[in-house]
Amino acid sequence: MNDQQVRSLLAKTAEAASRGEFEPFKTSSIFDSTAQNPDWLGEEPQRLQKIMPA
């Protein structure tokens, strides 16, 4: 694609891209296995547990 074609394509897709409407894997936690399995991360280190409320 030449520069003009790229600019044209980006202009056509800018609105949908700004909402993330067609990219739920980027804009939600639905596909985030770590979010669905927080135990994979393990416990926070003691030093963080002391400064952060439970």
Image (cartoon, rainbow, N blue to C red):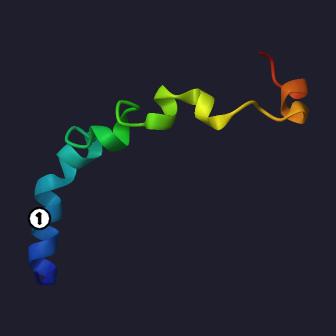
> Can you say whether 6 is above or below 54 in the image?
below
Residue closest to the eye, 9 or 44: 44
Q: Nearer the viewer, residue 27 or 36?
A: 36
Q: Position of residue 46 (x, y in %)?
A: 89, 31
* Residue drawn where x is 28% and y is 45% of the image: 18
Residue under pointer 1: 9
Total numbered circles: 1
Q: Quadrant of residue 38?
A: top right
Q: Secondary structure at mark 1?
A: helix
The residue at 64%/36% (across/down) is 41
Q: Identify residue type, mark 1.
A: Leu
Q: Give the left or right position of residue 36, taking residue 9 as reference.
A: right
Position of residue 35 in the picture relative to residue 42 (left or right): left
- Please report the residue visible at 19 percent of the width from the left and 46 percent of the height from the top: 15
Q: Quadrant of residue 24?
A: top left
Image position, residue 16 (x, y; %): 18, 44
Location of residue 21 in the rendering, given as x and y in whole percent from the top left corner: 22, 37
* 21 shown above or below 11: above
- Which residue occupies the extreme top position in the image? 54
Residue, far bottom: 2
In the image, is 39 to the left or to the right of 23?
Answer: right
Q: Quadrant of the N terminus?
A: bottom left
Query: Within the image, what quadrant is residue 49 found in?
Result: top right
Looking at this view, is 16 or 35 the one in front?
A: 35
Q: Residue at x 10, y 67 (%)?
A: 8
Q: Percent from the top left, x then y, of residue 31?
A: 35, 36
Q: Quick one: label 1, few (<14), some, or many (20+) residues within 10 Å?
A: few
Quadrant of the drawing holding the C terminus: top right
